[in-house]
Image: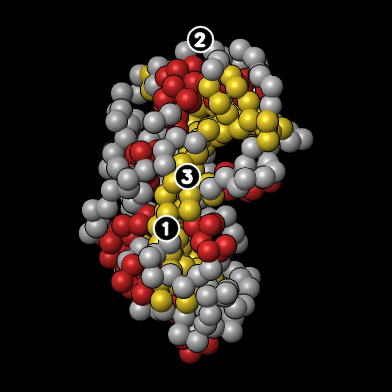
Amino acid sequence: MGRSATVVTPLVAALFAVLLASCAGVVEGAPSVAGVGEPIYGLPVSDHSRVELAVAAAARDITPCGLLDESLVASLGQVTAFGPVGDLSTCHAELVPPRGTPANPVWVEVTVGEREPTEETGAGEATSGIEVRPAVGALPGTCTLYFSLPPVPGVPDDAAGSGRWGHVSYLDGAGGTGDSAAGDDCAEARTVLGSVADRLRTPVPVRSDIPLAQQDPCRVVENMSGRGVETFSPGSRPYECLLTLRGGDAASVQLALSPEPTQTGGPEVIELDGKTFTYFRDALECHYYFYPGAVFDTNLPSSPVSERDKRSNRLTASVAASAPSCDDAETLVLAAAEVFDY
C-alpha cells in the first residue's frame, strides 16, 4: 500500500486530537462472559478482557440521549441544540437560561461508559440506588456528578473491570453569573441526575440514526487476522478499542462525531488502496481518519444562535486509527474501513 500525492483537507489537526482522544443499540456479535477461552472477533482473550468487553458492550446499549430528558432541560431555559456529540457516549444540550444570552449558553451533558471518573471526586453517596460522586475543585458555575452504571447481567460484581461510570455535567457559559438556583452550582446537575437515575431503572427506548453508534470498535480485529494483533480491549470510553500489535506497539481505533470539515487548512488527504483518508502525524503517532455517513445537525430549528456558532453543532461520523508506525496505522485504518465505512 502506498500514499498518493496530497492536498489540503478541511479539519485542523489539533481539533482532531482533542475530539478523538478525549446513542447505541445492541451490537451484533457482542461479547459475553460465558465460554472462557473461546475467541472473540477471532482472537483468544483473557478472562479479564472478556469481562471488560462485555461491560463496554452493555455501556453502548445505554443510549445517552435516552437518559437526558429534553423536556427537563427545556425547563432550565431555551434549548438551542440537543443530541449526541464527541465519542458517541455523550448527549449534549445547549440552552439559553432566562437571564442569559445566546453568546454565553449553558451546557448540560450526560456521558455513559467511562472506565472510572476522570476527575478527583468527593465522598460517594447513594442516590436512587446508584453511587454518586461529585467532582471536586470545579470552576464557579459548573458541576459534574459521576454515577455508577447498573451491574451487567452475568458479570460478577467483584470481577476486575466489572463496573463503569457515567456523569452529568452542568456548565454555565457566563462563568457562574447565570441562573444557578439559590447560588447552588450543582442544583441543576442534581435535578438532571435524578431524571437519569429514573431512566436507568426504566430505560426510554431511543435508537440513534448514526450507524456507528451501534458498533463495537473492537470489531476491527475481525479484519486484522494474521496482521499482528496480540491483544485487544476496550479503552477508557466504550467507543475506543486498544490493540497491542506484534512487537508490543500500542494502537487504537475510535468511533466519534467530529465537526464539519472547514474549507481551508488542516492535515493532508491521503489515498490508500484507492480510498481517501485524512492523515497527520504528531510527536508520538500517525493518525488516519475517514468519515462514513452524512452530517448530523444537533441545532434546533428555533435556535437563536448565530450561523457561525451553529457550525460546531453540525457533526459527521468519523473513524480514527492511530499507531506509532505509519505502516501499522495504514493497515489498521484500511481494516477499519472494511468494517465501518457505510
- Are the two marked residues, 3 and 2, in contact with CB atoms closer than 8 angstroms? no
Mark found first going from the N terminus, 3 or 1: 1
Residue type, label 3 = Thr
**Residue tagged by mark 1?**
298
Q: Secondary structure at mark 2?
A: loop
Could you tell whether 58 is left or right of 139 in the image? left
Residue 49 image position (x, y, % from top left): 45, 31
Q: Quadrant of residue 16?
A: top right
**Residue 84 sits above or below residue 227 on the image:** below
Q: Position of residue 326 (x, y in %)?
A: 68, 22
Question: From the viewer's perspective, is residue 278 above or below residue 169?
Answer: above
Residue 145, visible in the rendered structure: no
Element at label 3: strand
Tell me the element at label 1. loop
Residue at figure coordinates x 53%, y 68% from the top left: 306
Q: Which residue is mark 2?
A: 226
Residue at 39 percent across and 64 percent down: it is: 300
Q: Is residue 158 above or below residue 123?
A: above
Q: Position of residue 317 (x, y in %)?
A: 46, 41
Instruction: Report the front residue among 294 and 336.
Output: 294
Image quarter (top left, top right, bottom left or bottom right) of the C terminus:
top left
Task: Tell me, for residue 316, which label it has, or none.
Answer: 3
Judging depth in this view, the residue of 17 and 165 nearest the camera is: 17
> Which residue is pictured at 33% across the width and 73% down the height?
72
